Amino acid sequence: MKAQRYIVGNWKMNGTRAMLNEARAIDRAAARLPKVQVAVAPPGTLIFRTRDAVEIIGVGGQDCHVEESGAFTGDISAAMLKDAGADFTIVGHSERRALHAESDAVVKAKAETALAAGLSVIVCVGETEAQRDAGKAEAVVAAQIEGSVPRSEAAAEKLSVAYEPVWAIGTGRVPSTDDVAKMHAKIRESLVGIYGDAGAAVRILYGGSVKAENAAELLAVDEVGGALVGGASLSAESFLAIVGAAASLDES
Ligand code: PGA
């Protein structure tokens, strides 16, 4: 039996207060499935209310600034996320890397700031379609891991890595389970290279078009410790189908 799987919903820029009903429904169901660790990352405006509305599930940010406070209009610091009730934050999502020109160095600095603020962190990596077609997917992801994950052995305990091929995000396309297995094995090798033994325990999530229909198959792949779910996390029904798939695997 694998260790407790981690299923995280990334709501992206979706959700007003009405979405708190989904969070409550997710929370109630998660309470009955203790073998799965469940969390959601709502938009910043909902973190405080989501924390208040739920009991069991984790609540996190989708990004954070590298500084604790200051003249950074529109940004939110890790300390603020923590203060609002977040347990973790995602950093380095491909939408941040592409649309906000975030480099590996920036992602790493954000991850380190998040840890210093007392948050756990999910660092995202993943190749573009052109990089995969050019046969560079593993090299690209290995370089992102090397450049983006926070250092120190203690960091490994609060770190998850999400492998999200850019071409699979929101497209309905997913890599073959063979390709997922190969990439996750490669990521594991990088993490052990960086953290030593502690790198063996870092959870590696798969993300990109995870749905009820493919969740069981993806979550059963070696070294897949959970899923980062975008579109399908926006309703409790579709998200819980994925959580349920994780729970039944754990029971088998
Ligand atoms: P998706 O997004 O599930 O909608 O493909 C995943 C993500 O970007 O985290």
Image: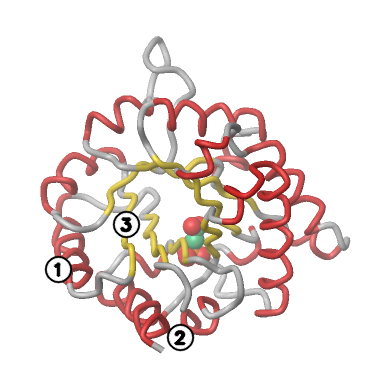
Q: Indicate the secondary structure of the residue bearing disc 2.
A: helix
Residue labelled 1 has its Cβ within 8 Å of some atom of ligand 1: no
Q: Give residue 136's position: percent from left, percent from top.
A: 84, 57
Q: Does the rendering let one see residue 160?
A: yes
> Which residue in the structure is indicated by mark 3?
39
Query: How far is mark 2 from mark 1, CA to CA?
Result: 22 Å
Residue at position x 39%, y 77% from top? 246
Disc 3, disc 2: CB below 8 Å? no
Which amino acid type corresponds to the residue marked 2 in the rendered image? Glu
How packed mark 3 is, by other alpha carbons closer than 10 Å (few <14, some 14-19, many 20 or more), is many
- In the rendered structure, the answer to whether residue 231 lies left or right of residue 54 reads right
Which amino acid type corresponds to the residue marked 1 in the rendered image? Arg
Residue at position x 66%, y 33% from top? 103
172 is higher (above) or lower (below) than 27: below
> Which residue in the structure is indicated by mark 2?
213
As rendered, which of 132 and 224 lies closer to the eye?
Answer: 224
In front of the other: label 3 or label 2? 3
> Which residue in the structure is indicated by mark 1?
28
As rendered, which of 51 and 182 lies closer to the eye?
Answer: 182
- Occupied quadrant, residue 230: bottom left
Residue labelled 2 has its Cβ within 8 Å of some atom of ligand 1: no
Label annotation for residue 174: none
If you read the primary sequence from the N terminus, does the residue marked by circle 1 or circle 3 appear first? 1
99 is higher (above) or lower (below) than 112: below
